[in-house]
Image (spheres, helix red, strand yellow):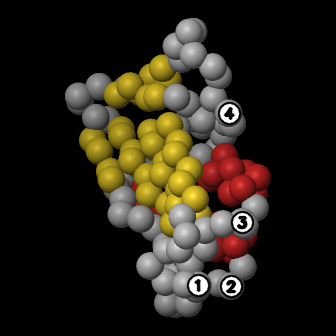
Amino acid sequence: MKKEIRPENIAAPAANYAHAILTTEESRWLHTSGVVPIAQDGSTPADFETQLTVIWQNISAMLKNASMRPNDIVSVTTYVVPDQNLTMLMNHRDSALDNHKAASTLVIVASLAKPEWLVEISVVAASK
């Protein structure tokens, strides 16, 4: 069981995400490592949008392997290098989550572990 927490005495979220998600102790949990834009063939796409597509495809595969769906995601943490299209990033997140709201953190970093990586995303999912 998951419930969005919406305190009335704080400002609304700045985008399509939840401030907090409450889960019950009966939930099964999936915590991913940072998912980087490496395609199944080992290649890394050069452009930001394709990197986002690859990352969300990889996350989807992990969810499916755990018998979970995108609406089981309760938290998304995104690391992105400067000068990327943040609107595109949020649109990909919203689409991948099928407009389901999860808690979300966005961190702009100087670089990631490999210079060709423009974005890295980790998620936490919970289901019964």
**Earlier-in-chain disc, 1 versus 2:** 2
Q: Amino acid at mark 1?
A: Glu
Q: Secondary structure at mark 1?
A: loop
**Earlier-in-chain disc, 2 versus 4:** 4
Give the crowd class for mark 2: few <14, some 14-19, many >=20 residues within 10 Å: few
Q: Secondary structure at mark 4?
A: loop
Residue drawn where x is 32% and y is 51% of the image: 30
- Label 3 vs label 1: CA separation? 13 Å
Asked if disc 1 and disc 2 are in contact, CB closer than 8 Å, the reply is yes
Identify the mark at residue 116; answer none if there is no mark: 1
Q: Judge whether residue 70 can be spotted in this image.
A: no
**Quarter occupied by the C terminus:** top left
Which residue is more in the foreground, 14 or 111?
111
- Label 3 vs label 2: CA separation? 13 Å
Identify the mark at residue 46; answer none if there is no mark: 2
Q: Amino acid at mark 3?
A: Gln
Q: Which residue is the site of mark 3?
A: 84
